[in-house]
Amino acid sequence: MLISIASIGKLSEKCACAVGSGRSSTLDYVFQEGLETSPNLKSFLQDVFTKQYKNARNLFLNASELNGRLMPEEPEFTLEQALDEDWLPWPPE
């Protein structure tokens, strides 16, 4: 079964609400629910992961006015790491 545009839109609306209210646990739940109910969602996320990283990087750099050399052009982590709530890109102190 393929993911419909409508289901992606509904997921996006849920995510926007979760992000807007600052409830990251809700956002995590929405993604986990989506990944469990639609295996194609993971495939879709993998396909757009690098592109969206680059888009987010550009938005961040434009908003922060930081030098682009401070942030890698390609993600230095995998989609699985990004979705793992216990993963950090640096060792905890």
Image (spheres, grey):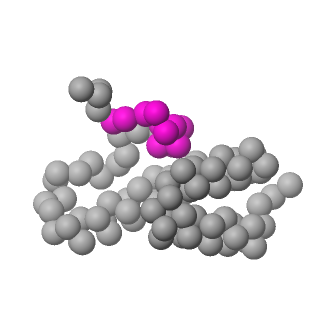
The image shows residue 70, relative to residue 85, as above or below, that is below
* Residue 44 appears in the figure: no
Q: Tell me where the magenta segment starts and ends, as one range.
A: 79-89
Name the outermost residue toward the right. 1
Residue 61 or residue 47, whichever sits in front: 61
Q: Is residue 14 left or right of residue 5?
A: left
Residue 7, horizontal then vertical, whole percent: 75, 67
Q: Residue 43: image x %, image y %? A: 66, 48
Q: Quadrant of residue 36?
A: top right
Residue pictured at 70% horizontal, 70% vertical? 10
Q: Nearer the viewer, residue 61 or 13?
A: 13
Residue 15: quarter of image:
bottom right
Name the image quarter holding the C terminus. Answer: top left
Judge whether 75 appears above or below 9 on screen: above
Please report the residue visible at 63 percent of the width from the left and 50 percent of the height from the top. Answer: 29
Report x, y in % for residue 65: 16, 69
So how many labels did they put on this image? 0
Q: Position of residue 1 (x, y in %)?
A: 86, 55
Q: Hey, which quadrant is residue 59 in on the image?
A: bottom left
Residue 85 within the magenta-colored segment of the rendering:
yes
Residue 16 as seen in the image, left or right of residue 89: right
Position of 18 with respect to 88 (left or right) is: right
